[in-house]
Amino acid sequence: MSDQAVVTIDTVGEFLVHALELEEASSDHYEELADSMEIHNNLQVAELFRKLAGYSRQHAKEVQDRTEGMDLPKLTPWDFKWKCPSSPESFCMEEASYMMTTTQAMKIALFNEIRGRDFYLQVAENTANEEVKKIASEMAEEEGWHVEMLREWQTSLAEEKPLEDLDPPNMPE
Amino acid sequence: MPVPARKAKDYKSDIKPVWCPGCGHFAVLAALTKAMAHLGLVKENVAVVSGIGCSSRLPAYIDSYGFHGIHGRALAAASGLKAARPDLTVIVAGGDGDGFSIGGNHFLHACRRNMDMTYIVMDNEVYGMTKGQASPTTRPTWCNSKMTPHGTGIPSFNPAAIALAAGAGFIARGYSGEPSELTRLLVEAMQHPGFSFVQVLSGCVTFRPDQRGWKELVHPFINDLPTEDRVKAAQIIQADDGKATGVIYATEFPVWQPENRTETELSELEEEFYL
Amino acid sequence: MNNNSQASASGESFSVAITGSGGSGAVTAGRILLEAAAHCGFQGLMTRSAGPQIRGGESAAMVRFSPDPVECMGDEYDLLVALDWLNIERFADEIPLSNKSLILCDPAAGEVPALLRSNGAEIREVPFKVFASGLPEGRLNMVALGAAAVVCGLELSAMEASVRQVLQGKGKQVVETALRALGLGYNHDRRPRITIPSPGRQDNRWSITGNQACGLGALRGGVRFVAAYPITPASEILEWLAPRLEKLGGSLLQAEDELASINMIIGASFGGVPSLTATSGPGLSLMVEGLGLALVSETPVTVVNVMRGGPSTGIPTKSEQSDLNIALYGLHGDAPHLVLAPLSIRDAVFTTQWAVQLAEHLQTVSLVLSDQSLGQSQAIIESPLPCERSLQRAVERSPGGDYRRYQVTPDDISAMALPGTPGGMYTADGLEHNTRGTPSSMAADHREQLNKRLRKLEKYDFGDDWAEVEGDGEQCIVTWGSSTGVVREAARRLRQQRGEVRVIALRLLAPLRQRQLRQALEGMRKILVVEQNHGAQLFHYLHAQGALPPSAQSLAQPGPLPLRPGRILRALEEPFLYNTPEQETDHAGSRTQGKRL
């Protein structure tokens, strides 16, 4: 984690390493959530997370393609210039719960996607490297569409009743 | 020539965790595999040993040799394994109940014995697998368990203080909500020669939903750390609110490890019995 | 009283008890006497009796020697050497005397207690103290030893050689003084009590304790890692092993408790190193959960349990065969495993080695039930034969793409991949699992793995070593472990007096070889099951297994007093009745009973 207020990334290699980590972590994170929702029989939310994982995987592949033939710098896991404690699209793990509704899951997803977009925006704003600015802006735009899509999706969802656990674990009354 | 795996994901097995969605242990698993990838560990030369509890399920989720033993005895099994097989990287994982209650004695003596291994305790201040009872690190006034309806009424266990008093040479605290930092702590712990202890605040969303609030409470140590000074470390630990993260104490003590070197044949030893 | 060639009270053997207050040197004197007998070509046995104090209280050494193997103490003692009379009442009933016995004592120590005089033993007085105080730093135990040597018919030169050997670490001055004291005692009264012809110097004789024998068996079996917690009467196994393991490329780890020691050896064995721990009843109780883990994860381990009086803290310094039940039944769940018991000190080498190798080969738990009477006794024996059998753990060195740690195979033994082996990675687990080792609560997996763990034991051919069967006739004594020595002696006497008897000494208690046992019992009209515990544990086990006819009788006597051959002979003479009520028959607490119908 970096304490810097402003994220500056000035080489294409460094930027792509960040982008790749962001998208891969995001995809892993959604997969993990989908798996555990499946294990806990919350299939609707599992499906949502599975879908989101697919998007991130697609993004990761696109970044991967851009890195073709490039000699990328090696970063240790704690040298990434995130402004938050983990990569931007994988935060808020503890907000998940096996009882969560699609609406709640969507909220988490939206929060993550906005942070992803903002990361790319900030890089584009602050970099001194034109090439980095160009790629970061493209990615920010893409993430922006993503955010919009999620927002539309969210508003189209009917208001849900909170899920009920008819056989709760030994929760204190 | 064994080749280390490249990515954290390569260190994960194909078994899906039984943990609840939102459980902090997912982040610990991720941080651990990242640390393993960073250190370039050869998978088959790693053994992850655990006891019983939610967090103790971890060995099965790592693609290495694993030993999921009985409640409280992970450190003992790991110590035997390391004594017999010093060539292995031994990682021990478990929870607060496993490590500090039923396994408390082994914790003390593993700290003293200082064998080269890393002990990760995922501390959520509750027994999750048995559905929500108070653990040694639960605060005395927590009344949400049916088993202790008035709270335990006894002060909670301070793992870092006990580890220091028992002679551990590396003591750190991390938080599952800060996986990058946690990865760094785990890497440093594994690089430390001797016994390294990492307490990870890893919340239980099911039985301690209040722990979602940890992200507001956790903060880095403000002191100049790590220290090699045991007295200073003791002062910091005693003054601490239990939510500060970082490596607190790092000193190298002699590592206990049998040499396992053959000097003679058994038939020679048998000579002693002849009259 | 006649001198020379009088038959000793216990047949072709001589039994000596040396008693004194703790610290008076009774045990050292006993060791010197035993080794002197060994120099003359005798075999022998020395047991000790002591209170729980580190020093003080009472202390006694009981030595018996004979041209033949000595595997138990006799019915009574030929000679009692009393260094003093302090606390004598505490072990008077461990040292039965008769009118054929002789008491050697110092008039300065006071009168012979009435308790001992009443049996009509002859008394010979020697001024131990006067002789000893005539020498600088003179010790009265050495004077007494000299006098005892005359009574035993052992030559002075053999005694001197033994003194030099036993005391060599104490310095020249001590040895010289001891030799002079020995000579004074020897020359005071030269009337021998008995002379058993000395067999003359023998080669291939060993001097070894039962605990050392278990340790050696462990090393022969391939054990290279031991973790253990000190406990009476097992500690000597650990003390003997620690430096020797180091020389052999292994190690011993002193654990924080028995919970740790069992789990440590499981960890080491998971790493591929044959591992063992040694303990006694209280420690075994703590280890039981760990045994289940080893068994279910199919991680081989061996536990030597040196039994003492139980339950709870019981009588830590005295022997009893009362841990059979916990060894057989102590584990929760369906947990088939191996239980073995050495039949003598000499046999402890073989049995422990076999137990380790069986555990390795069958990837299971092996329990070896030794006891205090074997463990802490010193024996002069013929050197044990090297074990020819060589069983090893099946190790998977090049696992294929679909390695399954718990694969069901024709012999139900599945090769184990060791950490460090590429492609063999699995998680060993105390949870029930499928063939890959993945936790499973499915009925089919549970049944399959239960079957695997049972059948690998059932299918294995244990050969003829499950028991030692000797003798013919129509009456039979069934016994196990350390009681074998005394049963064999009773049988020998019975054969000399009036005919045949068969002895079946069980070495492998679980899995019980039912078919072989039933065969060995065929045609027996009278069957007596002999063991040293209060609950007749073997008797009930054999009945539960359907291995005994209803007419079989039990002789069960708890510790701390040893079973004596005469008691067994008496039990055989008692009428055998169905459904006999339990009878309290003597001061040792032995009970005979039949099956309650």
Image (tube, coloured by chain):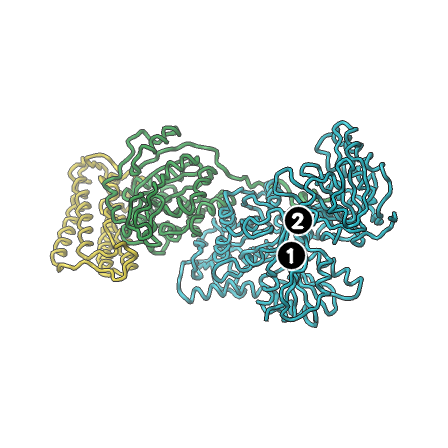
- In yellow, which chain? A
Where is residue A51 shown, x and y percent of the image?
Answer: 22, 57
The amino acid on which the numbered mark 1 sits, given as a three-letter code, is Gly
Which one is in front, B119 or A152?
A: B119
- Residue B62 can be seen in this image: no
> Colour in which chain C is shown?
cyan
Q: Which secondary structure, mark 1?
A: loop
The residue carrying mark 1 is C589
Q: Which secondary structure, mark 2?
A: helix
Q: Which residue is depicted at the point 34% across and 33% down?
A: B238
Where is residue A9 shown, x and y percent of the image?
Answer: 22, 37
Any mark on residue C210, and which? 2
Q: Earlier in the sequence, mark 1 or mark 2?
A: 2
The amino acid on which the numbered mark 2 sits, given as a three-letter code, is Gly
Q: Are marks 1 and 2 in contact (CB under 8 Å)?
A: no
- Residue C321 can be seen in this image: yes
In this rendering, position of residue C126 left or right of residue A94: right
Q: Which residue is depicted at the point 77% across and 50% down?
A: C119
> Colour in which chain B is shown?
green
Q: Chain of mark 1?
A: C
